[in-house]
Amino acid sequence: MDQSQFGGQAPPRPKNWLVESILVTLFCCLPFGIVGIINSSSVNSKYDAGDYAGALYSSQQAAKWTKIGFWVGIAVIVLYCILFFGLGIGMLSHRNNF
């Protein structure tokens, strides 16, 4: 992708997903969030260097890993709640039988 495809003007800057990646790293899933941060941090530098295709690819990768980290984090939290409350309530009812 070069400027000639856009009439001599640079294409719009792709979303870099940095804020979302940091939030996923802090609250959901550390490994996937870090991959998202690494990819999102390269979007602006690639765009500024004129590598528009590379910036778009990094943006897509950052979005992918941020979303994966978010959904994996949600799944872990849901499973934890199910196990904690399911086993916890089961243990309480079992304990009261004695």
Image (spheres, rainbow, N blue to C red):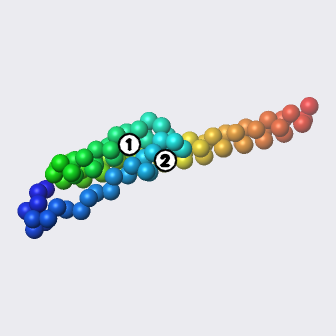
Q: Nearer the viewer, residue 62 or 3?
A: 3
Q: Quadrant of residue 76?
A: top right
Q: Nearer the viewer, residue 58 or 94?
A: 58
Q: Amino acid at mark 2?
A: Leu
Residues at circles 1 and 2 in contact by the CB criterion of under 8 Å: no
Question: Element under label 1?
Answer: helix
Q: Amino acid at mark 1?
A: Ile
Q: Which mark is residue 95?
A: none
> x, y (%) of residue 86?
72, 42
> Looking at the image, which residue is at 28% across and 57% down?
14
> x, y (%) of residue 13?
26, 58
Residue designated by label 2: 23
> x, y (%) of residue 48?
21, 51
Q: Nearer the viewer, residue 48 or 79?
A: 48
The quarter of the picture where the C terminus appears is top right
> Looking at the image, which residue is at 83% across and 38% down?
92
Of labels 1 and 2, earlier in sequence is 2
How far apart are the alpha carbons under marks 1 and 2?
10 Å
Residue designated by label 1: 37
Question: Does residue 73 appear to the left or right of 12 in the view shown?
Answer: right
> Looking at the image, which residue is at 44% across and 51% down?
20
- How packed is label 2: few (under 14 Cα within 10 Å), some, or many (20 or more)? some
| Direction right: furthest residue | 98
Question: Element under label 2?
Answer: helix
Q: Is residue 72 above or below residue 31?
A: below
Evaluate whether residue 64 shows in this view: no
- How packed is label 1: few (under 14 Cα within 10 Å), some, or many (20 or more)? many
